[in-house]
Image (tube, grey):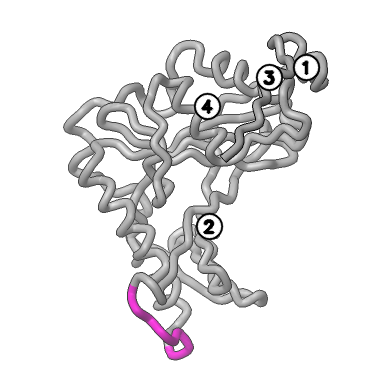
Amino acid sequence: MKSTKTPRLRTVSKVEPPYPLGKFPRDFIFKIGREIVYILATNPVPSIEGKVWERIFAGAIGADWKPSNVGLDDVILRVCAWGAKSVKISRPHKAKSVRLISGRNSPFYSFGERDLSGKTDDEIGGLALAIWNGRVEALRDKFSHLRTVVLLKSRNLTEFAVFETETVLFPPDRYKWRQNERGNFEGFEIETGVHRFTWQPSGTQFTIIEPVPKSRICFRVRKPEARDRDTLLKEIGFNRSWVEIVQD
């Protein structure tokens, strides 16, 4: 039976990454913790979703934040690019795996398929996986290293875990697909039987089920007292002159 090891990619070993995988720069956790506390203190309904997390991560490692349509290269630092994901989960410190929404993979758009009814489950799942692989391969031509950084966050935004993983190609012959009772297609590793992907025909959403590595960093922040509107406006010196009516 074929091995499920990650394939060696020719570009990876030629140029050193900014730092080893998962070995974040000094003060990384302090920097993202500071941003989180600021959000908690200044937002009536605090949220750390996609673009907010991308910006926070980019600032913490000294990278450029360049949101992309693909979602795999939103953060760039020299030869390395990252996709940044944030996932709300009950117990971030205890998570063993996490579902990462990884794009809209539409065989109808990408391959011009009009009708999937005559195809097997493996053929349909293979089309969805091929779209992912195509995106990754295109970016491998531009960057020596491609990673995904994941922030797991508790519902009250005080408990977190963060980890990195290589953004890799998934050889299609290593996975078996089947349609579940909800009409979605699930991909399983042939060798281990582990569920790794879900593709939803309705909306074409593609999800990767990623194991959480032991190297993840767990941390907490202290929730500050919320700043009320009037206090904050007074501190920044707001007055009526800040608002000007402009006639066309």
Distance from disc 2 to disc 4, alpha carbons, whole Å, reads 24 Å
Is the residue marked by circle 1 packed among few (<14), some (14-19), or many (20+) residues within 10 Å? few
Give the mark nearest the N terminus, 3 or 4. 3
Of the numbered discs in the image, which one, if any, rests on residue 37?
3
Q: Could you say where residue 230 lies in the image, as x and y percent from the top left?
A: 82, 18
Task: Look at the magenta stretch and give its main secondary structure.
Answer: loop
- Residue pictured at 73% horizontal, 9% vertical: 235
Mark 3 vs 1, N-terminal side? 3
Q: Is residue 90 left or right of residue 57?
A: right
Secondary element at image label 4: helix
Foreground residue among 96 and 21: 21
Q: Which mark is residue 207?
A: 2
| Residue extent of the magenta highlight | 111-118
Q: Is residue 100 left or right of residue 223?
A: left
For the residues bearing labels 3 and 1, Cβ distance under 8 angstroms? yes
| Residue at image mark 1 | 224
Q: Residue at x 54, y 59 (%)?
A: 195
Q: Position of residue 49 (x, y in %)?
A: 61, 39
Q: Amino acid at mark 3?
A: Val
**Which residue was labeled with disc 4?**
56
Q: Residues under labels 2 and 3: Cα distance? A: 30 Å
Kind of element beneath mark 1: loop
Is-magenta flag for residue 94? Answer: no
Instruction: Give the alpha-carbon distance from disc 4 to disc 1, as whole Å.
Output: 19 Å
